[in-house]
Structures are given as C-alpha cells and as structure tokens.
Amino acid sequence: MSHHCKRFCLFFLFFFFLFPLLLPQTSGGVILQYPCKPPKHNHYPFCNKSLSVTSRAHSLISHLTLPEKIQQLSDNATGFPRLGIPDYLWWSESLHGIAINGPGISFKGPISAATGFPQVILSAAAFNRSLWFLIGSAVAVEARAMHNVGQAGLTFWAPNVNVFRDPRWGRGQETAGEDPLLGSDYAVQYVKGLQGGGWGNARRKSVDFGGGSGFGEHRVLGEEDDVLMLSACCKHTMAYDLEKWGNFSRYSFDAVVTEQDLEDTFVPPFRGCVQEGKATCLMCSYNRLNGVPACAREDLLEKARKEWNMKGYITSDCNAVSTISDSEYQGYTKTIEEAVAITLKAGMDINCGSTVALHAKSAIAQGRLQEKDIDRAVFNLFSLQIRLGLFDGDPRQGKFGTLGPKNVCTKEHRRLALEATKQGIVLLKNDNRYLPLSKKDVSSLAIIGPLANNATNIGGDYTGYSCKPESLYDGLKAYAKKTEFAAGCTDVPCVSDDQFDEAVRIAKRADVVVVVAGLDLSQETEDHDRVSLLLPGKQTSLVLSIAAASRKPVILVLTGGGPIDVSFAKADHRISSILWIGYPGEAGAKALAEVIFGDYNPGGRLPMTWYPESFTKVPMNDMNMRANPSRGYPGRTYRFYNGDQVYGFGHGLSYTNYTYSLLSAPTRLNLLGFSTTRKRVLGSQQGGEYVFVEDIPSCDSLKFYVVASVSNAGDVDGSHVLLLFARVPEVVGGTPLKQLVGFERVHTFSGRSTEASILVNPCRHFSIANEGGKRVMALGNHILMLGDLEHTVAIGTR
Ligand SMILES: *[C@@H]1O[C@H](CO)[C@@H](O)[C@H](O)[C@H]1NC(C)=O
Ligand SMILES: *[C@@H]1O[C@H](CO)[C@@H](O)[C@H](O)[C@H]1NC(C)=O
Ligand SMILES: *[C@@H]1O[C@H](CO)[C@@H](O)[C@H](O)[C@H]1NC(C)=O
Ligand SMILES: *[C@@H]1O[C@H](CO)[C@@H](O)[C@H](O)[C@H]1NC(C)=O
Ligand SMILES: *[C@@H]1O[C@H](CO)[C@@H](O)[C@H](O)[C@H]1NC(C)=O
Ligand SMILES: *[C@@H]1O[C@H](CO)[C@@H](O)[C@H](O)[C@H]1NC(C)=O
C-alpha cells in the first residue's frame, strides 16, 4: 500500500523492477506452479478436497516447524519445496480494476492489460448497487483469469472503506464518499461481487456482465464452507484518512476520536463490509487510534471476528508493524519484538512487510509471544487459502479454470466501465439548459486543458494498464466536425501562463469550448493531501481567460477525486455548465462525449460535500465530526457541517426535471414491550425521550417501505437517484442535521411516472450514537425527507 520509502526502498525496487522477471512464465511452455501438484505432491491430507477446511489447515500446519510457520507471516510467504508448495504473494490490489500496485500482480505475460473502471468516488456517485456488484464481479473474472496464467494471486486488498472525512485527503478518491451508509452499501456490493457472488449466474449467461438482468440473485460468499472466487479486504481499520498534512503523517498520526463519532461515522462501513458483505480480510492501518496503534487494538480486531463474525485473516498495512517501534515514527514500543508481540496478540495474522517474519522468533525467545499465537495466525491464513482452492491442484481444472486471457478486457467488461463512468458523472451547473449540445449544430469544438489530451492520467490511483486508453480529446473528436486542442498549461500544477495565448486563440475561433480543469495525482494521492481546495496553480486564471475570449458560454469539466472550490465558475455566467467526471478511467472519453452531446442523460449525485476554500482553516488532524460553535469548529460532512458550501452532498442535475410524490409510508410506529423493567425509556436535557436500540425487542418488525412516485417532467428519459434522508429528534447532544436513510436509482421515461421503494430499518436509520457511543432511538417525530417532501413518522411505546 505504501511507498514508504525511507528504509524500504530496496524492498520496493525489488518488487517493481526485479520481481516481474522472476515470475514463473506460463506462456512459451514453462510450467505453472501450484501446490498439491501430481504425481508427487497431491497425496497430503491438506490436498484432499473431501476433508474439512479446518482439518486440511491443521494437517498443513502439522508438517511445519516453528521457523517455517513464522515465514508465513509476511505478504511474501515463503514456500516449502519439500511439500511442493511455492511462495505465495498475498498483496494484490483491485480498487477499481486490477492495479499494478502490489507484487502479487504482474502485467508481464499473456495478459498485459485489464479493464480500467472509474475511480471509486465516481462509481459511488452513480448510487447504483447492481453497478457496484457487477464491477466487483467483472474484476473477479479478470483476476481469476490472471491467476490461471500465473500473473496474480487470489487475495485482493480492496475496497477502501474509510469515510471521506476531510476534503483534502489524498485518498478520498478511493472511497465511496463521506456518508457511512453509502460507504457501507458500496462495500457490501463490491465485496459480494469480488468474492464471487455472481459467478453461477454469470456462467449461465456466458459471462455477460453488461446487461445486469442476469444478476437477479446476488449471493453473499464468505462463510467457512463457501468456495471463494477471490478474497476481498476491508481497509484500513480504523479512522485512517490523513496522509501527510502539516506536521502530521499517517505513519505516526494519533487519531483522537470520540466514542460517538466512532460508532456512527468511522465504524459503520467496516461493519457493513465484514458483517453483511462477508469480506474475508481486514487491514489495520498505520495510524494510532486514541493513543494505541491500530494494529495493536485488540478491541477493534476482535470486534470483526466475534461481533461481525469474520471468517478470514487480518493483515497490517505495509510495514505498519515496524512503524510502531521505530522511534522515527511512533516509538510506541521500545523494541521491535514488542511491536510484533502486541500486534499478533491483538489478532493480526500477517504483516505486509518482513518485520514479523524477521522478529517473531526473538519475540518468542523473550517470552513476549507464544507458539500458539503463531499457530492461530497460520491457521487463519491456510484456511483462507484452502477456501480459495489454492490447495486443490491445478487452478485450470478448478471451478474457475476456464477463465483466461479471453475473459479480460472483454466487450462486456469495457461496456460496464463505460456504463459506470456515465452513471457517475455529475452535472453541477447547466444555465439555460446549455447542455446537451446538438451534434448537428456544433460546427467546431475547442478542447482546452493540461489533462484533456492525456490518455494515461485519468484513472486515479491504484490503476493498472487499461485495455484501450483514450484521452478526453479523442472522445470528443468523434462527435464534432472540427476539433482543436490546446493544453493551456504544461501540466496540472500549471505554474506558468506561457501557453494561455495559444489556448485563447483556439477558443476564439471555436463554436463551442470545453475546458478540462481540476486535479490529478500530482495534487492528491497516497502520502499526499492537498492544502488548498482551489484549482491548482494558474488553472483558475486559464478558465477565466478562456471564458472571456470565447464567443459562447464555456463548458467546464472538472477532474479529480476531492472536492474543488469552483465558486468563481458557479457564479460566472460566461461558464454555463460544469461537469464533474472524477477519475473516469478508460471509458472516460466516450462517457464524457455521450453526456455532452446528449446521448446519455447525466444522473450522478455528489457523494461528498464541496466545501469552500475557507474550510482549510479547519485543522485536518481534528477528527471531530460534530460542529462545536464555542470554538468556531464547523463540523464535517453534510451530517454535521454548518458552514457555507459550494455544492452539497447529493447535488446533481440532469437534462430533465423530476418531481416526487409519496405513495406510502407509515405515520406511526410502536415499540412494544417497553413495560418490562429492563427496557428503559430515558429522558434528555432537551426533554425528549429515547430508548437504547439494544433494548428494542424486534427491530425486524419495525421495518417498512417508503414508496414514492418519481415523475419525469422533461422531454428526455433518464435514470434518477432518489435520496431519502431523516431528521431525528434532538434527544442527545451531537444529533446530526440529517442522515441518509436509503437511496435508489431508477430509470424514468419522459412524461411518465415511475415507482420506487426504499426499505427503512428504523433501528438502523433512525438511531444515532449517544456521547458514550451507544445507539439510541428517540421517541417522537422523525421526519423523512425526499427532495422537498417531508413526511412525519411518530415513534411511541404504545
Ligand atoms: C480423502 O479423504 C477421504 C475422507 O477421509 C478419504 O476417504 C479418502 O481416501 C481421501 N483421499 C485421499 C486421496 O487420500
Ligand atoms: C519472496 O521471498 C523469497 C524468499 O525470501 C525471495 O526469494 C523472493 O524473491 C521474494 N519475492 C518477492 C516478490 O519479494
Ligand atoms: C508544526 O510544528 C511546528 C514546530 O513544532 C509548530 O510551530 C507548528 O505550529 C506545527 N504545525 C501544525 C500545523 O501543527
Ligand atoms: C500524462 O500525464 C502523466 C502524468 O502527469 C505524464 O507522465 C505523461 O507524460 C502525460 N502524457 C502526455 C501524453 O502528456
Ligand atoms: C427544471 O425546472 C426549472 C424550474 O421550473 C427550470 O428552470 C429548468 O429549466 C427545468 N430544467 C429542465 C431540464 O427541464
Ligand atoms: C444500474 O447499473 C446497471 C449496471 O450497469 C444497469 O444495468 C442499470 O440500468 C442501472 N440502473 C439505473 C436505474 O440506471
């Protein structure tokens, strides 16, 4: 995960440059390596598919000495030639397609590219669960295909489910945004897809991932006896969302988080990812949480196993064990052996890096660690490998054995990438319905911007090699009779205006002008947070120069994962339209062109608040979600932030207009069974009453559907996202302004109404955390909000 280079440069140099040369070559007649290979190595009980996973794992452990077991506790797990077991590389990445990060993947071999889906923040903006599931499923197919030709492992460290807490965060782009419910729902679907929940259906439909209709039943895999297609990993637990800002670095940052914020902001996406999505891996983060290194927080790691029932393994982020003892970082323990002992004892099983492999032996000699701790870890690791089929012999003869190069970069996968990008694109502004452009009316088009002609720089971080990279300019060229391009700035940092004149010149003679501005990885990435929310360098001045020169209003296209303060453009009538395209991935060019020219009606909505530049006076290291007026602290995210915003969470226009009417929702719910003494109704300072959610006898009986009708009043069809929020009575301090209860993306037809239903689970959606981090539900009037509609649901005890 890290390019934590101070002392690991050699290690990485090795991974990225030398390692690919060492992978067993499968093309050209060289033989694929795998455990349990006949005729010599297939007789061990751990190779016997009719035995239970547990007994196979114990059988394997019984063959190993203590030093051998210790060698397993690294992402580069050393094999055992005498048992016919090759090395296994645990670390592979697939946030939004197979990525180059991580030594487990090689693009050298029969498969040299993989489908490049848009960066997660843009897919999140689509608010479409089946889309997320299908992307996970497509990535799983490509990963298995790569595995079958020796170019990938089966353990993938995605998704990133940390909440996008601060707009400056360099890795906010990798997440599903700032809302914990959205983050959780995203994780559930992506994990289900990635672990193989769509596989049976996909095969019946000859791997058609484009249509969606064949995926009615999305299975959840992750129980002990499930055959997993891949293993997904929920990262990074917990409260990790700062890279390098001011004097703070992720390697040593101590995130001070209240119990209340932990319960209703930081924990929920992990709970969803593990409990509902059934992810089989959890990654602990670099930072400390309330003083204790995340990988040493037994309470957090145990919660995943005991409360959320995780069947799988826990890995550290890369080198996150050595940073615990290293005085240059945390210096939390005096010795490296102590760091190894506290993390393994806390429940971590594997260390990305070699710290545990190198120092567990001396930790045992010092009496800090016992062999049983090592046995527990290797048992978890082997069990998962067995469930993935790694000890079932030749992968090409297994359940997923038919997958190979023909299943990568398929028409279906690339169509899905295009679909994802189109569904995610957000129309932020569209004065006088300037967009869409009409193909026949545009005589010439000028495309301006440092990123507009770059095909390789629009995937965001954790990207691989795309099937068919195309620049945004390439995409638009296909639509207009005449197109011209000018960069305007040499690159995204845009320190000089030397090239403005040329850009102004082409803008003057064009009929329609599109300016592509915004961010790339030079502004926001791993180990790099932003310090400003404004457009980088002289980009604002470039946009203004073009707006002044252009004959017609300008279309501004914004790239990047983090919000940008474009107040200047929002207010400027010379800029008619603004589109946010995130990091659109390999289909970005076509998707943008289809949106601009009206072949697709945009329906994406922002998954995060766009704050004004003044927000940067809030210290990034202040983890509080809740506003605190007494110290001028504005709070974070739409749930708590009380300041001005450029664009709000959920903002997104379309080429049509939608109106809602409510068809059904209850007006009163009763919590029965509150007469018994154990179940308490509590009062508050504000006078309202509330109950503990754990006291509610049956949460299931309280669930209901909100049924609404959406009518499309415009003259084009479009798919539309309904966002249902709740405002709950203020019975405890720190009650959110509102919170997302549910969402549904529906297809609508011009001039017609469509019905949509959203399931509400009051115990989850109407409850909030109190100051002690316990879930409470207020009695009294809860307000459901859908667009401008409000509906009251009264909750009482009789
Ligand atoms: C696998 O295990 C089953 C059940 O114990 C046993 O009957 C069978 O003989 C074993 N197969 C091999 C090849 O050892
Ligand atoms: C993994 O470790 C083994 C043994 O230490 C070494 O030979 C191999 O090159 C390593 N592989 C990678 C990718 O670092
Ligand atoms: C960073 O540290 C310096 C020196 O200790 C201090 O003056 C400064 O205020 C710190 N900056 C931040 C953002 O905390
Ligand atoms: C695209 O952007 C990347 C990253 O900034 C840069 O290295 C590359 O040279 C650019 N390519 C073109 C064609 O401008
Ligand atoms: C939507 O309605 C608003 C207000 O009535 C109107 O100004 C706007 O032009 C409409 N937009 C579309 C796309 O129909
Ligand atoms: C959600 O995504 C799937 C997969 O791309 C697509 O088939 C479906 O039409 C989308 N739903 C809506 C309402 O856009």
Image (tube, rainbow, N blue to C red):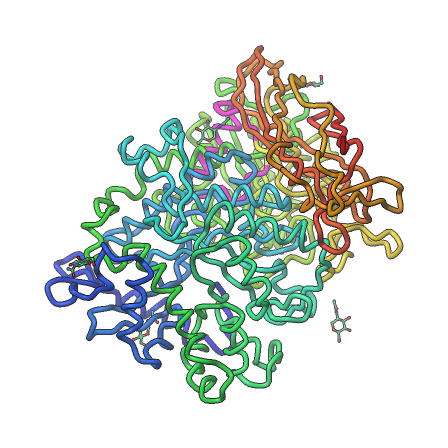
**Relative vertical location of residue 796 with respect to residue 283 in this rendering, above or below:** above
Q: Can residue 17 be seen in this snapshot?
A: yes
Based on the displayed image, in which of its 4 quarters is residue 338 positioned?
A: bottom right
How many numbered circles are shown?
0
Most distant residue in the front direction: 676
- Say whether residue 178 is magenta: no
**Relative vertical location of residue 84 with respect to residue 240 in this rendering, above or below:** below
- Say whether residue 583 is magenta: yes
Q: Position of residue 486 (x, y in %)?
A: 52, 42
Most distant residue in the bottom direction: 366
Q: Can residue 659 be seen in this snapshot?
A: no
Q: Position of residue 210 (x, y in %)?
A: 37, 31
Q: Nearer the viewer, residue 145 or 282?
A: 282
Most distant residue in the left direction: 39
Q: Nearer the viewer, residue 75 or 60?
A: 60
Based on the displayed image, in which of its 4 quarters is residue 753 positioned?
A: top right
Based on the displayed image, in which of its 4 quarters is residue 428 positioned?
A: top right
Q: Position of residue 111 (x, y in %)?
A: 27, 51
**Which residues make up the magenta segment?**
580-603
Most distant residue in the top direction: 751
Residue 361 shown left or right of residue 26 in the figure: right
Q: Nearer the viewer, residue 768 or 713?
A: 768
Quarter of the image with the C terminus is top right
Residue 300 shown left or right of residue 118 in the figure: right
Q: Position of residue 731 (x, y in %)?
A: 82, 43
Residue 311 shown left or right of residue 250 in the figure: left
**Relative vertical location of residue 251 with respect to residue 714 in this rendering, above or below:** below
Q: Nearer the viewer, residue 452 or 649?
A: 649
